[in-house]
Image: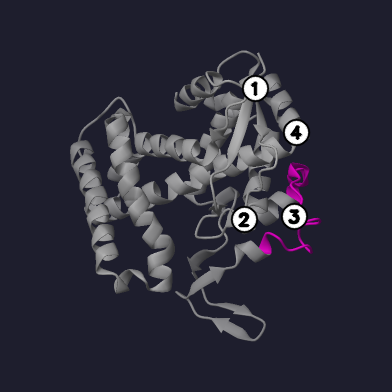
Amino acid sequence: MLSEELLDKWLSYPESQHVPLCQHMLGFAMKSVTQMVMGSTFEDEQEVIRFQKNHGTVWSEIGKGFLDGSLDKSTTRKKQYEDALMQLESILKKIIKERKGRNFSEHIFIDSLVQGDLNDQQILEDSMIFSLASCIITAKLCTWAVCFLTTYEEVQKKLYEEIDQVFGKGPVTPENIEELRYCRQVLCETVRTATLTPVSARLQDIEGKIDKFIIPRETLVLYALGVVLQDPSTWPSPYKFDPERFDDESVMKTFSLLGFSGTQECPELRFAYMVTTVLLSVLVRRLHLLSVEGQVIETKYELVTSSKEEAWITVSKRY
């Protein structure tokens, strides 16, 4: 299990060692997503590194070059982007071809697409979008969740108590993951407080109306989630990290309507919740997660919110 691999790595560190959290979480997310989407090919470290390099090139341009128009103004950047995208597509096409019409003991994300009523182009596009977005969303959710736990010791203590009650000394299992109610509250509050995705977009299914304005069907509607998630009329003390607020079912309903839980939840975020829950269960059970004194983490708002610079933590063993 990838979470156990990371735990073993952190357990080997002396307590004074600073851990580069963003770097480790990105590597962990890349391995988690590539193995889930594309299977055992990505158990090879070199394949993951190659994918991560191409992913970084493509994602940086999606987050910046397309939005500000700068990509088209630089032939060098555009060629690097197109080459990286072509390499990612080549990997996916190869795996799609290998999985079509065959049965494997290991079921991966691409198998679900291949078995559905989709043509090859749809399978390629869906697997590409999921791979690109899931890596970043998972990495940043893991990063911010650990950051908040290092800052709010009482939250980490309560999460540890829940994990200990649910799992004891036994293994972390998919069945028991569902029992981690407080952990889910921690992740929801992480998404809200960090404004993990400041903006979202959705096509209007039916004609809508806001005051006197008509929104025609098929209109692309942008949601300013970064504003809504910090609105004091909806979230009392909006800048306070307080997982207890999600103990209220009406609050969870509001969160669901915004697309962060329930039926409106995007598959990439659903995957990130699952992976981060497993990771926190493994790490918090064995380790105290500690902040580095004097560190100030500044936020960078893009398609997915990140820290401007590396976030450092230290760890100490519980047992």
Question: Magenta span covers which residues?
Answer: 228-250
Is residue 14 depicted above or below 241 in this figure? Answer: above
The kind of residue on which mark 1 rests is Ser
* Sequence-earlier tag: 3 or 2: 2
For the residues labelled 3 and 1, the Cα–Cα distance comes to 28 Å
The kind of residue on which mark 4 rests is Glu
Disc 1 designates what residue? 316
The kind of residue on which mark 2 rests is Thr
Disc 4 designates what residue? 153
Q: Which tag is nearer the camera, tag 1 or tag 2?
A: 1
Disc 2 designates what residue? 195
Res. 127 visible in picture? no
Disc 3 designates what residue? 239
The kind of residue on which mark 3 rests is Tyr
Q: Quadrant of the N terminus?
A: top left
> Residue, x 75% and y 55% (percent of image)?
239
Q: Secondary structure at mark 1?
A: strand
> Residue, x 60% and y 44% (percent of image)?
144
> Residue, x 66% and y 43% (percent of image)?
295
Q: In the image, 50: left or right of 205?
A: left
